[in-house]
Amino acid sequence: MKKIILPFLTAAMMSTAFAEVDAEIEGMEYEVRGDGTFLIGGPTYAFDRIMGAGGTFSESELWTPAKLRERLLFNRMSGTPSWTPMAPAVWFKTGNELGDLIYQNLLPSDEPNPANRTPYLEGGFTTPSFKGFWATARLFQDDHFCGKTAGPRKQFVGESFAHFGENIPLFSTAYGGLGYTNSMVNASLLVGSEYLWTYTATSRWIPVHYSPRIEARADVNNVSVTVAYEDGEYKDVRKKESGRRQEINGSIYYQCGEQCKRGMLQVSAGLSFRGVNDSGTVYTELENERVLWPFIELRAQPIPRLTADVMFGINERDWLVQDSVQFTSPTPKNMGIVAGVKNISGTRLNPLADTKEFMDNHEINLVADGQMTLIQGYAVFNDTLGNMSIGGRGSYWAEYGAETFDVEDFVTGAMTYRYGNVSRINSWIKGVTGELWFNAWYQDLFKFSAMGGFEHIDGLTKKLEVTPTEFFVSFGGDWLINKTFRIAHSLKYRSDARWNLRSPNPMVVKGDWYWDVTFEERIPKYGIIFSGTLLHALANEVIEVPNAGYDRLRLICLAKKTF
Amino acid sequence: MNKLKVLFVAMATMVCSALAQTDSTAVAMPAPAQTDSVKAPEDYAFEHFYISIEGGEIYPWGDLQDAVENTLYGGVGIRYSYWENADGFMTFNYSYFRPVPRTKIDGVHQFSGKVGLEFHIKYIKPLVIGAGFACNFTRADMEDGVDISFEKDLGGTLADNETEFGWFVRLKLPLFNYEKFRVGFNAQWEELWTLPKRSDMMTMGLYIEREIW
């Protein structure tokens, strides 16, 4: 699954090991990264661009076979909310954006009460296997980032749009199901209900209530099958609009197995698909109400030091190719030097996404004519000296036909919307990146990492959706005391980033320092874990995505018993 | 504040008397796990397990004294051996705060859950120092039908459920033991991460603990 991006991942893995601070939920790992531009609108939307990846788009906009079991939320692949069954355990997790008033609200003040802070809630279990059979259930919803926009969003859905509470969170998911696992098969069937808000090209948050949502998975030897059925209800209470989308989506995927990997040419292949049946007003459209996306992956290794990968997918509307060639240089022991070239070309970054959006009387075309091409050359070195290592990575990239949005007009009010069409920047945008890192460690007790990087971009940067951050520094320290108590923390700074096209005047997200920390008490003999994670301390509480809520300091606590 | 001073003096007296003990067995020590040179650090977990009840008084600190009055609290807890010289613990307490200013709410129910570690440091024994995270859930107590504004009224935000996290440090002084029972004094300083200022409180209480294994 990872082969197509392996050369680049290999390079990334040679970079610094980031502090192992826990994200608030799976799929939001970008919130604890420091090596790029990570602008969070909420658990269902983020602009997440790793600096060394090159190009003008964010990671989640690019479809790859590695994301087959992630969720397609409008035009991005998202790890949140995940329907991947959890390992056998029972757990409870809660958190809050810090800064409620509590007893401070009993002190007279001339200022109006500040906005309410909102929580995170989760509970669930997965049973141990009984003759291969197991059961699971999970309720989880993340109310963070939702306070500022709850008012305007309530106009769509009324007072309540979640399994719990009235905060109008950006997602609220509950599912239960059964599974079967043995040495050959791993299969599961989950049924549930989900409230979800997706962020679209017009900058609207569009609500959908899936009831039911059903997802079945089966892994048999080297073949993985996923099928999901979603019965989605759409509504805008204020405009008295309603609609329904019944959707079937999924994939079948053959991965090159152990025996196949011994050959000089390794082949994997699959088919991803979506089919929808729309009635009423659902705000987006998938052309022909279906998409079939066959793809093939090839890896050739003619000599051990040279690896070539290609992923190619095509259908009647789109094509996408991602390929790379990577050479590992002969070096002295404890040193590694890798040089490579990668290319991404295609008509769409995500060929499975919807093709049109509708806002009032406007039709927004989400498919641009022509194609994009990204070429990147990179070199990575890493040198280990005892308990220390140093490394660096440099790259040069150029992208032609980058996707942008031709804004025809804005609609301003409580929120700012836009309409127009997705189009292309038909000129070259070029970038040069450089990163350096230093790691030190002592057995499994302590790890330290420091990293810094810069990027300079030339071209029509004002036509980019986001002008990314130009430099960052990041420090991380992890302790594992008595092999049972883990403290992981990271301190990082990233420079300004800018949204160019979602408001009449560009929106600058100011550079800032961020501090994240996890305390984790482990009792391995009984499989018990207690943890507390503070996210985005030190930073000013700012809005990082147009029409989104504040990125606030938040604390997440977890109690878990594994079986 | 007079009560607080009295308690401080009482605590200092007890600390001095406890430190003056030459025979440490005269003071009930929380029992750390048995020393065993071949034992791995992770093997101490849950060698001992205790349950407890606790009660005492909570004193708002600083500006918070103008918001709520001193109040009593009561609750339950567990403690378990974690490392050779450290124990893990959890406590759950209930208290009812009466507001100082005249407001539309009669009082505030508070449920506080705390998770932490405490350390048996030989230089300060028999005192045991601990720290951890706190999670406090609050809800206003008021008559049915009271019209209260979330934005404008004093305590208006408490009319809905409110939760806030914080951290705390505590100092435990074991006083005596009898078979499987221990009695001791607990002093705790707690900070909730509220806005516009942090909310600080001091807690003084007595606990009775029973060893289960």
Image (spheres, rainbow, N blue to C red):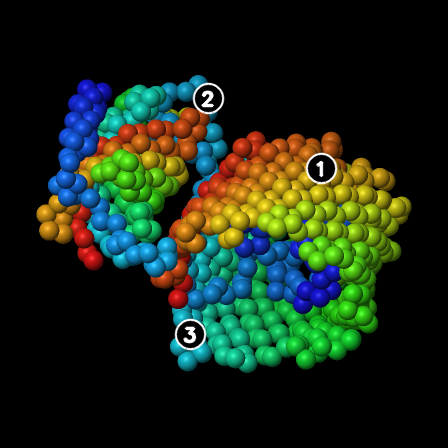
Q: Are marks 3 and 1 in contact (CB under 8 Å)?
A: no
Q: In this view, does A176 lie above or below B89?
A: below
Location of the C terminus of chain B by quadrant is bottom left
Q: Name the residue under label 1.
A: A471
For disc 2, the chain is: A
Q: How crowded is mark 1: few (under 14 residues within 10 Å), some or many (20 or more)?
A: many
Q: Nearer the viewer, residue A449 or B60?
A: A449
Between label 1 and label 2, give the one nearer the viewer: 1
For disc 3, the chain is: A
Q: Which of marks 1 and 2 is nearer the N terminus?
A: 2
Is A108 placed left or right of A59 in the picture?
left
Q: SS for tag 3? A: loop
Q: Which of A463 and A213 is in front in this view?
A: A463
Q: SS for tag 2? A: loop
- Residues under labels 1 and 2: Cα distance? 38 Å
Residue B69 location (% of width, % of height): 25, 26
- Disc ID at residue A30: none
**Residue under the point 60% across and 71% down:** A227
Q: Which of A535 and A63 is in front in this view?
A: A535
**Residue under the point 30% across and 40% down:** B121
Q: Which of marks 3 and 1 is nearer the N terminus?
A: 3
What's the residue type where badge 2 is placed?
A: Glu
Location of the N terminus of chain B by quadrant is top left
- Disc ID at residue A111: 2
Q: Name the residue under label 3.
A: A129
**Residue under the point 54% across and 64% down:** A84
Q: Do the residues labelled 3 and 2 touch (CB within 8 Å)?
A: no
Q: Which of marks 3 and 2 is nearer the N terminus?
A: 2
Residue A328 location (% of width, % of height): 77, 60
Q: SS for tag 1? A: strand
- Residues under labels 3 and 2: Cα distance? 56 Å
Residue A334 location (% of width, % of height): 68, 56
